Image (spheres, rainbow, N blue to C red):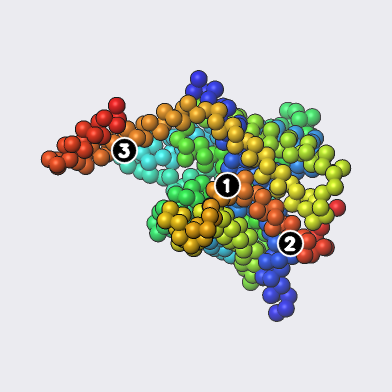
Amino acid sequence: MGKDSRLILDPLTDNNPITIQVLGICSALAITAELEASIVMSISVLFVMGVGNVVISLMRNIIPSKIRIIAQLIVVATLVIIVDLVLKAFAYELSKTLSVFVGLIITNCIIMGRFEAFALGNGPWRSFLDGIGNALGYGIILVIVGFFRELLGSGTLLGIQVLGDPIEKTGLYSIGYENNGFMLLSPMALIVVGIIIWIQRTRNKDLIED
Amino acid sequence: MEHLELFFKSIFIDNMVFATFLGMCSYLAVSKKVSTAVGLGAAVIFVLAITVPLNWLLDQYILQPGALSWLGEEYASYDLSFLSFIMFIATIATMVQLVEIVVEKFSPSLYNSLGIFLPLIAVNCAILGGSLFMQSREIASLGLALNYGIGSGIGWFLAILAIAAIREKIRYSAVPPALRGLGITFIITGLMAIGFMSFGGMLTGGDDGAEKEDKAATIKVIKEDLKDDAKAKADLELADNTNK
C-alpha cells in the first residue's frame, strides 16, 4: 500500500511533471490567465490520463511495439473528443476560452510520457494511480499559476472581485493599489513557472541541475 | 500582399513559441546545443509545410459542416467536424512515418541529421497546434495554408535557435544554483516573449481596419433593434452620425 500511495504523492512534489519532468508545458502556460480555465483544464487532463492509462495498460500486451505511438494517439484523441464535446455542451463559453488547447491535450507530453514510461509496463490499477497522480501534479501547478495571474492581473478569483472594485475605488484600491495587467499577458506565465521552479529547487537542493 | 502579411504574421506576431506556447516541451528539452536545435527546427518546418496543407484539404473537403457536398446532395447536411482531432493526429502520425521512410531511402545524409528527430515530432504540440489554428483561423486557400505552415515553422525554428544559442552562452554566467537549467530557461523565454510582443505593432494598420468593421457591425445591430421603435429615431440619427 505504501508503494501505491507513492504513485500519487510523488508527482505532486519531487517528481512533478511540469517543474521536474518538463512535460506538458504548452497548455500549462497558455490557459492560466484565469483560475476557472486552469481548473477545468486540470479536470480534463485528469479524466484523459486516468482513463487513458487504464486503457493502454489493458492493451499493453496486444499493441505491436512498432505502431504503439499511433495506437496511443488514437486512444487519447478519442478521449479528448469526449472531453471537447462535453465542454461544448455544458460550458460553451469556457470551451471558447480554451479554444484549441483542449485539442492539444492529445499532444500533451505528460500523457504520452506516462503511457510510454508507466502504462506500457504496469497493470491497470497501478497505471490508474500513476495517471491520477501525474494529472494532479500537473493540475496543482496550473492552479497555482492561474491563482496568481488572475489575482494580480485582474483582482478577481473565479470571476469574483476579492480586492474590491477598481472603478468605485473600494477595498485595496482605495489606498492606491492598481491591477498589474501585465500578469494577464502570456510571457508572465513563463516567468511565474520559472519562479515556482526557483522556490521548489531552493527548498529541495537535490533537484538542482549542474 | 495577403501572402506576405500572413507569412510575417505567423513568424513574428503569432510566433508559435512566444505567443501561443506550442511545442514548448521539445523546445525546452532539445535546446541545449545549437546543432541539435537546428536539426529539430528544420524537421519542424518540413513537417508543418506538409501536414498543414494536407489537413487543410481534409478539413475543407471532409470535415467541415457541409464539406461532403461534392459527393452529392444528400451528403450536404453532414457535419463531421467532431472528428477533426482524430483525423488530424492520424494524418500527422502517418505523414511523419512516411516522411521518415522516404527520407531514409533517398537521402541518407539528411536522414542522419533529421531522422532521429522525426519520431519526436509526431507528438510535438507545434504540429497539431499548427493544424488546429489553421482550422480555427479559417485560412482561406491551399496556398495560404502552405504559407502558414512554412511561416509558423520558421517562427518555431527561430525561437529554438535563439534559446539554444543563449543557453550555450549562459553556461559561463553565475546563475543562482536553484535557477540553473530549467528555471533560467523559463525566465529567459518569458523575457524573449515580451520582446516579441513588440512585433504586434507591425501590422496595426490592418487591426485598425478590423476594429472599424466591428464598430460598424455593432451600430448595424443597434439600428436593427431600434427599427420599429418610433422613439428610437433620434438615436438612430445619432448612431449614423457616429458612424460618419
Q: Is residue A79 above or below residue B70?
A: below
Residue at point 41% right, 40% down?
B64
Q: Earlier in the sequence, mark 1 or mark 2?
A: 1
Tag count in the figure? 3
Please, which chain is the residue tagged with disc 3 on? B
Dot 3 crowding, Cα within 10 Å, few <14, some 14–19, many 20+? few
The quarter of the displayed image where residue A114 is located: bottom right
Marks 1 and 2, how far apart in space?
A: 24 Å
Circle 1/circle 3 CB separation < 8 Å: no
Circle 2/circle 3 CB separation < 8 Å: no
Residue at point 74% right, 65% down?
A14
Residue at point 63% right, 56% down?
A111
Mark 2: amino acid: Gln
- Residue A69 placed where, x, y %? 65, 50
Tell which residue pokes out farthest to the left in this image.
B230
Mark 3: amino acid: Thr
- Residue B140 placed where, x, y %? 45, 29
Between tags 1 and 3, which lies in front? Answer: 1
- Residue B225 placed where, x, y %? 21, 42
User: Is residue A133 visible to the viewer in this orientation of the structure?
Assistant: yes
Circle 3: element type: helix
Between tags 1 and 2, which lies in front? Answer: 1
* Quarter of the picture holding the N terminus of chain A: bottom right
| Residue labelled with disc 1 | A182
Q: Is residue B164 left or right of residue A147?
A: right
Circle 2: element type: helix
